[in-house]
């Protein structure tokens, strides 16, 4: 059982991590084929204007059903009721097809309104890009239900591998189509962007093919479970789905928070900058690309990888909550927070210091773009802390608390958006997001500390923060001194500089963690290989 759990965790992590890394690496050749820096900025703005509402509508279309169905299937299988799990799964597929189609129609209908408010020059171009995402929105919710069925059968392998296939085929299609349009046909980057957004549909089909072929291979096992299963009981599918909704909606609401904030930026930024500050549409589009479209590709990876590592302890919280083991809950939360900060702070701060190089590797070299990327990376620390703390509180069953605080946060974002953006432009929009997330995170942390944490359980946090600030300050000063004599100005040199510089200071960070004893306390072993280190 333990081996199966470890195998499942491996495939889930592999699928998630590889998909996200591949989802940013492809940008380098894609943007190079798009053409000039101005065309690259426009392409990123159009792509993001389509992808953010698509991601939000997809979240609504899936509505947490796959995870809930997975739990339902696992529960029925544990009672030798495989026929019941199939019964619920079939109705779930139909329901997901309905919600996907409904959300697709809504996205198609609202596309012109979303495009008009987005920070793009051409409403017509953005409308087309958004509508190209509609077919994907229809097919992905049922596919997520199939993944949930496998998960409910304690088989994580197809979930992880299907994610890999989906992203790999998507990227291959994007690069092939863009090469054909831009290099062979000498066509328009707008057409290349439309084909790139349509690639999500092609990737979805590839994932379907893998999932269905895997089901065919497992058919013998499923037939055996079916024949050995107890007869189908009289199930009230309406009641089951209603309960799933009640359970899933808080997770969906909180899980879509960052996308909701990005959507607020997309719908308000252009109007504020054009109507209140006198900026023209092209300048607003470029600024939106610099502070939202480009940085979100980097920050999403940082946040998701950090959370993927720290969330390894979260399933235990749900079990401990049922046992009412307050002391052990506190220890687990403390370990979770320490692990999260240990991985989050160095990745965010070192990337922020190397913002010129990181921005230049993936996007056109730009001083403003680098500054906004650095600021976005620093503020992403708050976003990651929010995600982790709210996941903790929900794992402990405090859904109403999480929903109340997030609702307050959204109102804070809306209240701060206009004055902050008017005063500080793109920095203001990022600050409005960071401040609202920070305030509600402090509120939720206060509740966690009051209810679960005991004195001394977070004793390592101050030292972790001090070590990170020391390494970051040393790295910043060193980087500034080097920049007096050398600044990398092409992608290869920028990559080499970032890899060597970042690697060196990452080793320094690990060394300081090891010498302070934090590394052993968090990860369970020392880095040094001396005889003392082994004991």
Image (cartoon, helix red, strand yellow):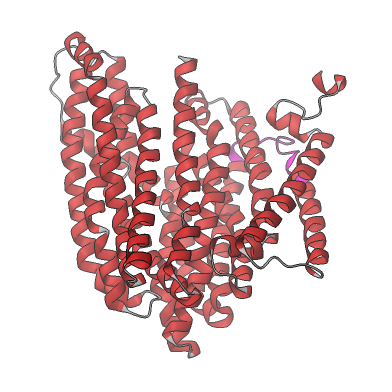
The x, y position of residue 360, in whole percent, is 60, 65
The prevailing secondary structure element of the residues shown in magenta is: loop
- Where is residue 297 drawn, in percent x and y? 50, 57
Measured as percent of width and height from the top left, residue 416 is found at 51, 73
Report whether residue 412 is seen: no
Task: Residue 96: name its quadrant.
Answer: top left
Which residue of the protein is positioned furthest toward the bottom in this rendering? Answer: 278
Residue in the picture at 61% in, 62% down: 491
Would you say residue 277 is visible in this rendering? yes
Residue 210 shown left or right of residue 371 in the figure: left
Callout count: 0
Closer to the camera, 384 or 351? 351
| Depth check, front residue: 171 or 62 | 171
For the N terminus, the image quarter is top left
Up/down of 310 relative to 200, above or below: above
Q: Is residue 459 magenta?
A: yes
Q: Which of the two residues, 195 or 392, is positioned nearer the viewer here?
A: 195
Tell me where the magenta segment starts and ends, as one range.
450-463
Q: Quadrant of the C terminus?
A: top right
Residue at the front extreme? 184
Residue at (80, 44) in percent of width and height: 508
Q: In the rendered view, would you say 339 is above or below 234?
A: below
Q: Is-magenta flag for residue 316?
A: no
Q: Is 135 placed above or below 363 here? A: above
Say left or right for 68 vs 231: right
Q: Residue at x 30, y 41 (%)?
A: 246
Q: Residue at x 55, y 68 (%)?
A: 430
Residue 386 is situated, as x and y percent measured from the top left of the image, at 55, 51
120 vs 492, left or right, is: left
């Amino acid at each position: 059982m333990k081996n199966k759990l470890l195998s499942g965790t491996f495939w889930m992590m592999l699928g998630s991590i590889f998909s996200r890394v591949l989802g940013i690496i492809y940008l380098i050749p894609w943007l190079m084929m798009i053409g000039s820096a101005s065309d690259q900025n426009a392409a990123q703005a159009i792509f993001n204007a389509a992808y953010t509402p698509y991601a939000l509508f997809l979240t609504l279309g899936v509505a947490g059903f796959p995870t809930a169905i997975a739990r339902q299937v696992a529960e029925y299988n544990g009672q030798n009721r495989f026929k019941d799990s199939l019964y619920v799964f079939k109705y779930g597929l139909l329901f997901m097809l309905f919600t996907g189609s409904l959300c697709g129609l809504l996205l198609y209908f609202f596309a012109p309104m979303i495009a008009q408010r987005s920070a793009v020059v051409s409403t017509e171009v953005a409308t087309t890009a958004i509508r190209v995402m509609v077919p994907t929105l229809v097919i992905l919710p049922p596919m997520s239900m199939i993944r949930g069925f496998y998960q409910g059968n304690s088989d994580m392998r197809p979930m992880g591998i299907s994610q890999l296939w989906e992203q790999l085929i998507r990227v291959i299609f994007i690069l092939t189509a863009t090469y054909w349009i831009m290099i062979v046909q000498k066509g328009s980057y707008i057409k290349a962007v439309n084909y790139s957004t349509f690639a999500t549909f092609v990737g979805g089909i590839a994932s379907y093919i893998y999932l269905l072929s895997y089901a065919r291979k497992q058919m013998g096992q499923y037939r055996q479970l079916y024949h050995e299963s107890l007869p189908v009981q009289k199930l009230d599918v309406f009641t089951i789905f209603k309960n799933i909704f009640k359970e899933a909606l808080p997770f969906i609401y909180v899980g879509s928070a960052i996308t909701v904030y990005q959507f607020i930026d997309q719908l308000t930024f252009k109007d504020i900058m054009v109507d209140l500050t006198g900026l023209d549409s092209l300048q607003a589009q470029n600024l939106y690309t610099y502070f939202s479209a480009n940085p979100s590709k980097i920050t999403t990876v940082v946040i998701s990888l950090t959370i993927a590592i720290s969330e390894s302890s979260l399933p235990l919280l749900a079990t401990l909550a049922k046992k009412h083991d307050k002391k052990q809950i506190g220890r687990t939360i403390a370990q979770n927070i320490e692990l999260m900060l240990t991985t989050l702070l160095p990745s965010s701060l070192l990337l922020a210091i190397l913002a010129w190089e990181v921005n230049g590797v993936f996007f056109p070299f730009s001083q403003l773009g680098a500054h906004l990327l650095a600021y976005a990376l620093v503020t992403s620390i708050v976003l990651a802390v929010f995600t982790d703390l709210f996941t903790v509180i929900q794992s402990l069953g405090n859904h109403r608390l999480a929903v109340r605080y997030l609702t307050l946060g959204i109102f804070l974002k809306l209240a701060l958006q206009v004055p902050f953006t008017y005063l500080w432009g793109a920095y203001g929009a990022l600050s409005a997001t960071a401040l609202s997330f920070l305030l509600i995170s402090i509120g939720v942390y206060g509740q966690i500390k009051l209810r679960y944490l005991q004195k001394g359980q977070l004793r390592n946090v101050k030292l972790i923060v001090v070590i990170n600030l020391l390494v970051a300050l040393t790295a910043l000063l060193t980087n500034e001194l080097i920049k007096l004599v050398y600044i990398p100005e092409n992608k290869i040199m920028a990559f080499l500089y970032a890899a060597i510089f970042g690697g060196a200071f990452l080793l320094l960070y690990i060394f300081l963690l090891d010498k302070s004893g934090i590394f052993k306390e968090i990860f369970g072993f020392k880095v040094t290989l001396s005889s003392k280190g082994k004991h």
